[in-house]
Amino acid sequence: MRLIRVTEERVAVLYAQGQVPGFVHTSVGQEAVAVGALFRVRPTDVITSTHRGHGHVLAKGLPPERMFAELMGKDAGANRGRGGSMHVADPELGIFGANGIVGAGLPIATGAAYALRPRGDVAIAFFGDGAVSTGAFHESLNLAALWQLPVVYVCENNGFSEFSRTGDQHPVPVAQRAVAYGMPFQQVDGNDVEAVDAVMDAALAAVRSGGGPRLVEAVTLRVRGHYEGDPQRYRGAADLPADPLVVARERLLASGVPRPEIDEIDDEIARVVASAEKFAVDAPEPDPATAREFVTAPRRFVAVTDPGAGTPVSTSRIIRQALSDALTDDPTVFLAGIDVAGGNVFGLTRGLAEQWPDRVLDTPIAETAIMGLGVGAAMAGLRPVVELMYLDFLGVCLDQLMNQAAKLRFMTGGAVTVPMVVRTQFGSGRSSGSQHSQSLEALLAHLPGLTVVMPSDPADHYGLLRSAIDDDNPVVFIENRLIYERKGPLPARGYRVPLGSARVVRPGTDLTIVSWSRMVHLSLAAAAQLASEGVDAEVVDLRTITPLDRDAVLRSLARTNRLLIVHEAVTDFGVGAELAALAVNEGFWSLDAPVRRVGAPATPAPYAPALERTWIPTENDIIRAARELTADR
């Protein structure tokens, strides 16, 4: 406790002096919670923390030298200076990360708990009272209670949600939240380290014995402001209860521990913190040449092979076979999502739960929990394939992809891998309306750290999905539902397609058409019509949106000198714009005509069939644009 207190006090000083950049949220006053909660954990247990997480990571065993260095942005820091105060992590110590997003660690801890179940280990999720109003809190507790996962949720109720008193934010006490999920609950004096230890000892024992999750509320205090520099006009002196270090010192004295012995502890901690601070001050800055490192894990080598001439089957059958083969070949793979065990809305996973009842799992309708399940389980060593029923639902769970899965490897300086796949689907043309028709790949491709795959060919659905599951990066695998019944040969079991590799599906000399997903088939049909008119169009299927195979596009453009981009998404600010920028930059001297794009207009997808037909790009739209591009050749 003394180590945490002195460290935090020095961090506050260093921040005021400008030696710690960014934002700093200290945990002064909450030391008893961190120490009492983690006193009996195993090295193999996992914690997730909050933006106020310095005490948690120190209590879990992170050396103060590495924490000081991380806060100062040094290469010797816990995350090589990529995480900073709000994102300290060390997966080797079971520290799955402090988190700058309120409540975001709860789904990750829930996912980790699923992975820890066979090992007898436990996940501990720290969160503040402000997080109980978030969807992440409710979805996590609901899933953990439903699956009886080994996780203890520790609420540090310091009386404030950022700048507001807890009573002004939450009409229902934390205890009643636990009742709502049928979860055992215990409140404890968070300023009494022995009391916290006793409650957590019982909670951990119950969880380890298969008793399911627990919710512990530690009523504690926040001595300093929400952040360093907070003027705290919203609080007064009456808000400060007993200091946990004073409580502990007085109890030690009362129990007969000599004062000099306690003073020696204080002196020793002062020396330890001073040494750690000096180490960090003297440590070198990260080399600017490494600024782009740790965004993605190294890709596995994938040999280009022939898919074989298997029996023609539907693309939906091919996807199911890819998932079945992955489950058979790798015991760390599991599937989870809404109605996955029942076959999913399109029947793609039908029958898999009968063969793997413990690895094909139905979840509640809780997209944030589903994504967090994937992130946490992947960090803990599994290879989850989680399903987002419709791509349109991305907005419900974007944080777990955008701020967690995509960034964790970078923010931990390469210490974390997140080998998860998010399977989802989209497709316009069936009057699904504005909330079930969107092609949102541009949004995902804009997030460094995510891999985005959009196959068109039946065999590619198998090869790319198997490669995605093998990959050590988070992959969003986007299927077009209007392709599900398109038939092609079932590939051989070992077939793989390299991620980030485009394919020329029709060679040509007069025009390059670049497309992906269902629009590849329209482009091929358009190319056939253009050929009858004397225009030889080359069609390039991107297959992977990111990483983008820029070289393949530029090579094709160098052969044809004209570029037409075709996608189902709205044209404005899309992937087509990125390809156009590529053409007029690196490919400028190959261009004999302006770059053209064919896509949907910048409106939501309409419902009425008559309107939708005018909104969706068609074969005739492609032909018309191609004619205009080649009119002067």
Image (tube, rainbow, N blue to C red):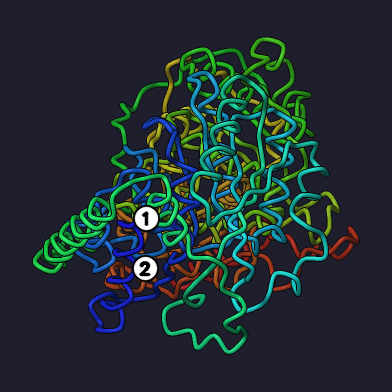
Q: CA distance from mark 2 to mark 1?
A: 8 Å
Residue 324 placement, left or right of 278:
right
Mark 2 or mark 1: whose residue is earlier in sequence: 1
Residue 168 in which image quadrant: bottom right
Which residue is painted at 75% across and 53% down in the image?
A: 428
- Callout 1: SS: helix
Residue 164, position as x, y percentages in the image? 66, 77
Q: Label 1 is placed on what type of residue? A: Val
Which quarter of the image is occupied by the N terminus? bottom left
Extreme top residue here? 355
**Residue 500 appears left or right of 311:** left
Check the image and report above or below for 440 versus 486: below
Instruction: State the SS at label 2.
Output: helix
Labelled disc at residue 173: none
> Could you tell me if the residues under marks 2 and 1 are in contact, i.e. CB atoms within 8 Å?
yes
Q: Which residue was labeled with disc 1?
A: 553
Which residue matches tag 2? 583
Point out residue 15 in the picture as x, y percentages from the top left corner.
Answer: 30, 78
